[in-house]
């Protein structure tokens, strides 16, 4: 139903994104998109680039008088640090980054050619796309939020902050775990009819595609493995007022690849940023001699930002699945269809 493409290098002229398939009749406020872009730039542990950039999306197409036409929506986010042509070569790949695999795959000897696109700066485009999807979902009272659960194995806010400061003082980096919740999602998005329609599979792919994410769980996730079935499956209840419901939500809102009407909950873990100020061993790809990895300006911790990015990619997946279920041309028709469906469920 929906599809998108992003383009742009970290230090290129701009990041661009095109979203196709948004229905006609949706009011889009660029201030709302910019608010999400700003949220992505925040968090303790962000690097100096975030002080340079003030990400703002220009809406290039798809709107008339602030309302969607049903045509592709194009966004452009200009880079203040547009320096790609004059940046020096990077010849000692950073362990953990795309540098070495990218060099070998594409036949480069300068990892700058790799890191410019592999950089997480690309996620600004996805947050722009996700913001449009959130505005759409909010028409149906679906809301998405995120929270940092842990940093470097610490679970309280103060200890997490201390861990980031410790990483900074040691010229190191640190990862963590974040949680994303979508509330108000109706039962029936996604399907078991074919593997690529399963909602949990689609969400996992989207979350895993965020740079640095190494693990994704839905609901109880890996915790299922430690328990008997009788203690983890969410029993089913029904009242006239509520319809069907569960008192627990270990499934994280998805059963059989379909949303079940409960909150959709996912957790993901993010590895520590791979650019280290005290670099690890590497090899110079020109001389093939041992060398320390190249040092680039980078962040110390981006777990909070990753949560915002995960909210955005979840918004995209949910909007896509919603349009599959309820039609995709005109917002007013989709609302009629949705309300009829809710009546049937009750
Ligand atoms: C990022 C911009 C980048 C990095 C970061 C994400 O800016 P620069 O490379 O100019 O400092 O701060 O990139 C990475 C973490 C990475 O691994 O490439 C951004 O806008 O999010």
Image (cartoon, rainbow, N blue to C red):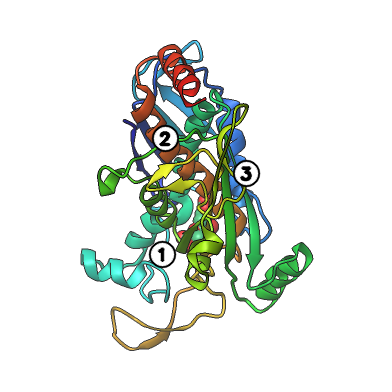
Residue 248 position, x and y percent, is: 60, 51
Q: Give the percent coordinates (x, y) of residue 3.
A: 32, 35
Q: Nearer the viewer, residue 293 or 339?
A: 339
Q: Where 87 falls versus 173 (above or below)?
A: above
- Residue at the spot 41% in from the left edge and 86% down from the top edge: 291
Q: Which mark is residue 188?
A: 2
- In the image, residue 239 above or below residue 249: above
Dot 1 or dot 3: first in sequence order is 3
Residue 223: mark in rendering:
none
Label 3 sits on a secondary structure element that is helix
Q: Which residue is at a point 49% across and 23% down the rendered structure image?
A: 342
- Looking at mark 3, is its residue's CB closer than 8 Å to ligand 1? no
Q: Is residue 136 visible?
A: yes
Q: Nearer the viewer, mark 1 or mark 3?
A: 3
Q: Which badge, 1 or 2, comes first in the chain's sequence?
A: 1
SS assignment at label 2: loop
Q: Work out whether mark 3 precedes mark 2 in sequence or the reverse, and give the earlier one.
A: 3
Q: Whole-Å distance between the Cαs marked 3 and 2?
A: 30 Å
Q: Residue furthest right?
A: 158
Q: Which mark is residue 39?
A: 3
Q: Which residue is mark 1?
A: 88
Badge 1 crowding class, 10 Å Cα cut-off, few under 14, some 14 to 19, many 20 or more, is few
């Amino acid at each position: 139903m929906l599809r998108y493409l992003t383009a742009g290098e970290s230090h290129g002229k701009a990041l661009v994104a095109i979203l196709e398939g948004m229905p006609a009749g949706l009011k889009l406020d660029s201030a709302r998109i910019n608010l999400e872009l700003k949220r992505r730039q925040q968090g303790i542990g962000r690097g100096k680039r975030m002080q340079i950039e003030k990400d703002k999306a220009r809406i290039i197409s798809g709107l008339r008088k602030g309302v969607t036409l049903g045509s592709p929506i194009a966004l452009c986010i200009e880079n203040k640090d547009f320096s790609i042509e004059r940046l020096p070569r990077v010849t000692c790949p950073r362990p953990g980054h795309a540098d070495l695999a990218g060099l070998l795959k594409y036949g480069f000897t300068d990892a700058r050619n790799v890191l410019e696109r592999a950089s997480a700066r690309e996620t600004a485009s996805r947050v722009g796309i996700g913001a449009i999807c959130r505005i759409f979902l909010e028409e149906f009272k679906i809301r998405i939020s995120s929270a940092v659960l842990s940093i470097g194995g610490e679970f309280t806010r103060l200890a997490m902050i201390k861990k980031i400061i410790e990483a900074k003082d040691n010229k190191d980096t640190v990862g963590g775990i974040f949680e994303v919740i979508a509330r108000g999602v109706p039962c029936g998005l996604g399907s078991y009819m074919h593997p690529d329609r399963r909602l949990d599979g689609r969400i996992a792919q989207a979350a895993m595609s965020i740079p640095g994410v190494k693990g994704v769980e839905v609901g109880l996730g890996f915790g299922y493995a430690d328990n008997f079935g009788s203690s983890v499956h969410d029993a089913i209840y029904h009242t006239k007022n509520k319809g069907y419901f569960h008192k627990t939500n270990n499934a994280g809102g998805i059963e059989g690849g379909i949303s079940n009407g409960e909150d959709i909950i996912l957790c993901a873990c993010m590895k520590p940023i791979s650019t280290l100020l005290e670099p690890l061993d590497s090899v110079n790809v020109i001389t093939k001699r041992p060398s320390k990895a190249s040092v680039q300006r980078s962040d110390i911790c981006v777990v909070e930002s990753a949560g915002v990015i995960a909210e955005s990619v979840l918004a995209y997946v949910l909007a896509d699945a919603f349009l599959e279920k309820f039609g995709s041309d005109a917002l007013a028709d989709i609302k009629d269809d949705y309300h009829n469906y809710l009546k049937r469920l009750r």
